[in-house]
Amino acid sequence: MFSKNKEYLQPEGYPKFIKNEFLESKDIAINIYLKNPGIISKHYLKLILLYSSIIFFGVIVIIIYTSS
């Protein structure tokens, strides 16, 4: 979803992106979990990796900005 929607490449679009991801998580939890419980762990692992990469990118930018 992130790579397909170019409006999420701007930092001001992150709250909208996170809200959409949580709505997608709710849909998965309600509908798909009954059919395939393994997909939940994959989805949340994807979210954890995505959000941590956003945070680490911000930390790297802050470190580079303050060191120069």
Image: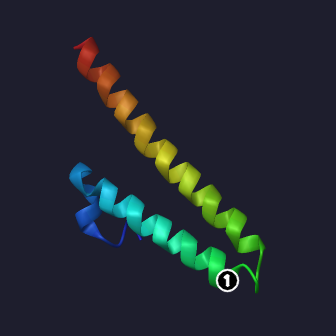
Instruction: Please tell me whether mark 1 sits on a helix, a strand or a loop.
Output: helix
Residue 36, image x, y percentages: 76, 81
Residue 52 lies, with reference to residue 37, above or below; the image says above
Outermost residue to the top: 67
Residue 32, image x, y percentages: 67, 83
Q: Residue at x 67, y 65 (%)?
A: 42
Q: Quadrant of residue 16?
A: bottom left
Q: Say whether residue 4 is visible.
A: yes
From the image, tell me which residue sits under label 1: 32
Residue 59, image x, y percentages: 39, 29
Q: Nearer the viewer, residue 29 or 11?
A: 29
Q: Residue at x 43, y 38 (%)?
A: 55
Q: Quadrant of residue 2?
A: bottom left
Would you call the spot at circle 1 few (<14 residues within 10 Å), some (14-19), or many (20 or more)? some
Quadrant of the frame with the C terminus: top left
* Residue type indicated by callout 1: Ile
Residue 60 lies, with reference to residue 21, above or below; the image says above
- Display colour scheme: rainbow
